[in-house]
Image (cartoon, rainbow, N blue to C red):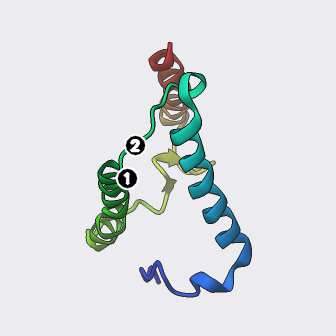
Amino acid sequence: GDVFDPFKNLASSPMFLAVIIFTVAAQWVIVEYGGDFTQTSPLSYDEWKITFALGAVSIPVGYIMRLIPINEDPESFAGFQVEGAKDEKESSSSSSSVGLLVILPIVAAV
């Protein structure tokens, strides 16, 4: 099933822990010392606490989202039709939505 336990076996994966530690350290260095290169300025202790708290909110929000029941169509995956499941008309709209998902972030970045 879909059991939510974010801290189960956390210490049993040394690669995961290494990635998390590196990510936290890299973000701290980039924010504190990035300056003009990364367009950041150092945060105060209170700002770091707020940032940490906002990030920590994602765990209970994710838990609550997993409690919301959803009905999935077994004929599709992530909103896209499984090959051979429906007619060509729906598959063409699926490919156009993929194109939109690729192009939209690029346009937004420009």
Horizontal side, residue 20 vs residue 94: left or right: right
**Tags 2 and 1 touching, CB below 8 Å:** yes
Dot 2, crowdedness within 10 Å: few (<14), some or many (≥20)? few
Q: Position of residue 53 (x, y in %)?
A: 31, 60
Residue at image position (51%, 34%) is: 94
Horizontal side, residue 107 vs residue 20: left or right: left
Going by the numbered disc 2, the residue's amino acid type is Leu
Going by the numbered disc 1, the residue's amino acid type is Trp
User: Is 41 drawn above or below residue 6 in the view shown?
Assistant: above
Residue at image position (27%, 69%) is: 64
Pick whichever, 94 or 9, lies toward us.
9
Residue at image position (55%, 34%) is: 88
Q: Which residue is mark 2?
A: 43
Q: How far apart are the alpha carbons under marks 2 and 1? A: 6 Å
Pick whichever, 43 or 83, lies toward us.
43
User: Is 96 drawn above or below residue 48 in the view shown?
Assistant: above
Q: Position of residue 66 (x, y in %)?
A: 34, 70
Q: Which residue is mark 1?
A: 48
Residue at image position (52%, 87%) is: 8
Residue 70: image tag: none
Disc 2 or 1, which lies upstream in sequence?
2
Q: Secondary structure at mark 2?
A: loop
